[in-house]
Image (cartoon, grey):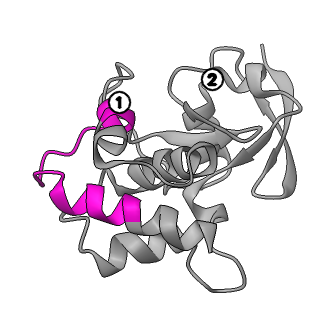
Amino acid sequence: MTISVTITVNGQQETRDVEPRTLLVQFLREHLQLTGTHVGCDTSQCGACVVHIDGKSVKSCTILAAQAQGAKVITIEGLAQDGKLHPMQEAFREHHALQCGFCTPGMIMSAVDLAQRNPNPSEETVRHELEGNLCRCTGYHNIVKAVMAGAQAMRG
């Protein structure tokens, strides 16, 4: 049995027939080939799969594609505009806030949501807000610097 799901992803309306148990992360990766959204843990602990659903960051491994029916989803692929990196992406690049890069898409998506809610976050706030995003490579120091710089760039 399959169901039809329609979701606007990165500004493009997408309709696919999926099994009812299909997770949003599977819909994005397997049905739309948007592989920037990563699966890191299968337990919703790591945050590698964070996307924005109707403007809020959500771990896409915790929601069924059917639950996102009619929603607007932005993935890491949807942040850059006209070939130009989003300010948060640019800040991560400038501040060397990645090593292997596996956690980076989820970190950036969480950071953009944070900066939209709190345009001038403190270091303590950034560290608290990123608790749901795990990185195995860094000590988070450059990630925190990048989030703060990206938030500053986003506010102009």
* As drawn, 43 above or below 75: above
Task: From the image, tell me which residue sits under label 1.
Answer: 132
- Please provide percent x and percent y for residue 31: 66, 45
Disc 1 versus disc 2: nearer the observer: 1
Dominant secondary-structure state across the stretch colored magenta: helix
Left or right: 135 with respect to 90?
left
Judging depth in this view, the residue of 150 and 76 nearest the camera is 150
Q: Amino acid at mark 1?
A: Gly
- Please provide percent x and percent y for residue 89: 47, 70
Q: Dot 2: what SS?
A: loop
Residue at image position (51%, 50%) is 109
* As drawn, 134 above or below 79: above
Task: From the image, tell me which residue sits under label 2.
Answer: 22
Residue at image position (27%, 75%) is 95
> Mark 2: few, some, or many residues within 10 Å (few <14, many ≥20)?
some
Q: Amino acid at mark 2?
A: Thr
- Give the label on residue 9, or none: none
Judging depth in this view, the residue of 92 and 24 nearest the camera is 92
Judging depth in this view, the residue of 149 and 96 nearest the camera is 149
* As drawn, 64 above or below 115: above
- Please provide percent x and percent y for residue 4: 87, 27
Of pointers 1 and 2, the one earlier in the residue sequence: 2
